[in-house]
Amino acid sequence: MSEKLNLPIRPRRNRKSPAIRGLVRETILHSSDLIYPLFIHESPENDVIASMPGCYRWSIEGLLGEIGEAWRAGVRAVVFFPKIEEALKTSKAEESFNPRGLVPRAIKAVKAAYPDITIITDVALDPYNSDGHDGIVEMAASGDLRILNDETVAVLCRQALCHAEAGADIVSPSDMMDGRVGEIRAALDAAGFEDVAILSYTAKYASAYYGPFRGALDSAPKAGDKKTYQMDPANRREALREAELDIAEGADMIMVKPAGPYLDIIRTLRDAFDIPIAAYQVSGEYLMIKSAAKDGWIDEEKVVMESLIGIKRAGADMILTYFAKDVAARLGA
Ligand code: PBG
């Protein structure tokens, strides 16, 4: 039976060979799109992170080694997340702007060894706050928690300045307090850091996908949850409103987080704004791929590439991913 259909249009012609598929490919992932999140701690050892297989809490020495490998693979941007010792955590998170703290020291060491790498820092209080929240907590007599917005913003400004003074290229507020982008911009400008950029976590959702990260940093909230500041996963229009505000306040880049379950949000913001968009493939997304691949149920390499292409196709210009070093090594610089 070789009945020929009368089909003048056959989309499969454009998929005939690797070369033709290359010609018509719409989305290409480059090493230069990747941002590598790295955990650091105050210890000479590099600790395995149980909740994130393949990730480590690095000593500063270890961090330099890992960044060296990542740089040679083609990674050009990193972001640091510190695990702070319990004894340094306070209800006002003063350690977050200690100029001799872990993050400023890491920035200086990395800048000295790799002056051309872009250093991004996370601006939020949760690693430093004895309550484990991104902002300062007020406990009502009833036992209800309130996260104080304006008081928190003042501390975030000091934290951002501390990172800028140490040499950060981009500060990245992940706290979701109202008005923090404008205040941080003003504080940076007043101190002469007009070249330090702000990558704002604009649409950061109250997500269960952050679980493994909180395990890595021991930073889970001691009481309550983050729903009064992080966004409701059910909302899309609200992301437009957050983006309008962050852009008006001076954000240089905006972020959607998590990435995979929020591709429609990336696309919504991409269609509405011209500003560069980052997407964060978070710890839970990482762990799900790692766990499924460990038992051979999925092909890790292929699923990772597909997940990142999906995020880029949705409209992200850059992607934070724990797979950054591996992916860059595969893509080439
Ligand atoms: C905290 C912060 C979180 C992540 C990045 N910055 C956790 C949270 O908001 O609870 C999560 C990243 C990940 O899960 O990979 N400001």
Image (spheres, rainbow, N blue to C red):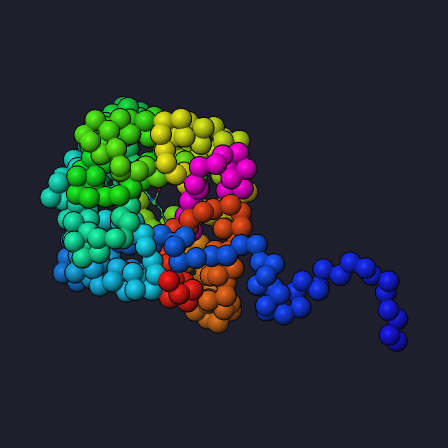
- Taking 177 as reference, is 45 left or right? left
Q: Is residue 124 magenta?
A: no
Q: x, y (%) of residue 34? A: 38, 54
Seen from the viewer's position, the closer of residues 196 and 290 is 196
Q: Is residue 273 magenta?
A: yes
Please state, as top left, top right, bottom left or bottom right, where the N terminus lies in the image. bottom right
**In this picture, which residue range is highlighted in magenta?**
265-284
Is residue 10 visible in the rendered image? The answer is yes
Seen from the viewer's position, the closer of residues 93 and 62 is 62
Q: x, y (%) of residue 312? A: 49, 51
Is residue 81 visible in the rendered image? The answer is no
Please state, as top left, top right, bottom left or bottom right, where the C terminus lies in the image. bottom left
Please tell me which residue is depicted at 33% across the width and 30% down the height of the picture: 181
Q: x, y (%) of residue 288? A: 45, 58
Point out the quarter of the image occupied by ligand 1. top left
- Taking 7 as reference, is 287 left or right? left
Which residue is outermost to the left? 100
Seen from the viewer's position, the closer of residues 258 and 272 is 272
Relative height, residue 62 to residue 84 (above, below):
below
Q: Quadrant of residue 55?
A: bottom left
Relative height, residue 310 to residue 175 (above, below):
below
